[in-house]
Image (spheres, helix red, strand yellow):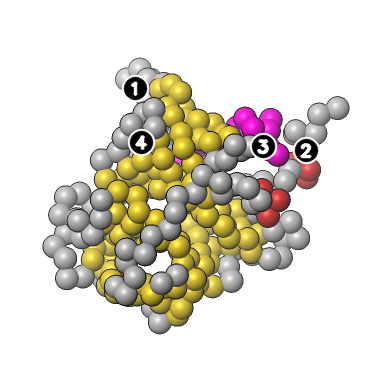
Amino acid sequence: MSTLSDTSTWLPLDGLAPGFDANKAPVTGDLDGRTFDLHDDGSGHSVRITGTTVTWDGSAAPAETFLVDDDLYYLQFHPAAREAVSLLLDLRNGRALVVTTTIGDHGTPRVTQQFRPATLGGTEARGEPMAPSTALTGRRVLWVYSPEHAYEHVYLSPHWYTWQCLAGPERGLADTDENTVYRVRPGIHVFAWREKVIPCASVTVADHRDARRLRSHGVLFGLDGTGEHPTHFTFGAHGRLLSTTVHPAGLDPAED
């Protein structure tokens, strides 16, 4: 008898990690030696990049830096036991987005996220700020993380999406979880989700500009199979748009 509906048998986060990062982009040292001051809602943060280490508000942590687009960088680091930070830096437009992912003691979802748009000190902010977006709603996308791992995403609404594993150790599993989408640049979005079965959350930076050649960079962060220890790893994926659902006026979930 199938055990797909028995969530107690689902793979823990640390069981997914081996090989899942095969399509991860190479890290870049473009920002080595640079310091950025971020300003958001009257507060601020300072981040300095030194090789594979960032100093975040005075605390040092290992970090990975990925080039997403011209002058657009994604930094991922794990500054505290139950906290991870995903940082988008748009050097061209003087803007940033800080996503803090935190493992809580209880609740559903167990792992939560906070999104804080910011500006870069010493740089004139141009264009639109990074802000919530409904641009992905209605899309069905195939994401391939490695030769063995493939998933499809169906972006249902500004709050929900459905995932299904098409290849890999989770093949046949599917669920609907919370998501958040922020526009970074035209066609480039932060897509983040929070799972309710496995205590984990993800932040991805997804380039949707070419529907046949999508690209994403991201992180999964949560608890291992024991439920006691954090698991934090980065990955990448290549994708393509499979279809788009267009709802009639008045029934579009992207509408307010």
**Bounds of the magenta span?**
159-174
Q: Residue, x 46% and y 37% (percent of image)?
A: 238
Residue type marked 3: Gly
* Residue 191 seen in this snapshot: no
Along the polypeptide, which appears first: circle 3 or circle 4?
A: 3
Of label 1 and label 3, which has the lower sequence position?
3
Label disc, if present, on residue 208 of the rendered structure: 4
- Residue 156: horizontal and vertical position, in percent? 47, 31
Determine whether the residue tagged by mark 4 lies in a helix, strand or loop.
loop
Q: Are marks 1 and 2 in contact (CB under 8 Å)?
A: no
Residue at image mark 3: 168
First of labels 1, 2 by sequence position: 2
Q: Where is mark 1, residue-wise?
A: 250
Q: Amino acid at mark 2?
A: Asp
Residues at circles 1 and 3 in contact by the CB criterion of under 8 Å? no
Q: Residue 96: x percent and y percent?
A: 29, 59
Instruction: Give the CA distance from mark 3 to mark 4.
Output: 24 Å
Which residue is rendered at x = 70% and y = 39% of the image?
169
- Compared with 48, 188 (above or below) is above
Instruction: Indicate the position of residue 5 as horizontal and vertical percent values.
Output: 75, 34
Instruction: Measure the alpha-carbon separation of dots 1 and 2.
Output: 37 Å
Disc 3 vs disc 2: which is toward the camera? 3
Mark 1 residue element? loop
Towards the viewer: 253 or 151 = 151
64 shown above or below 18: below
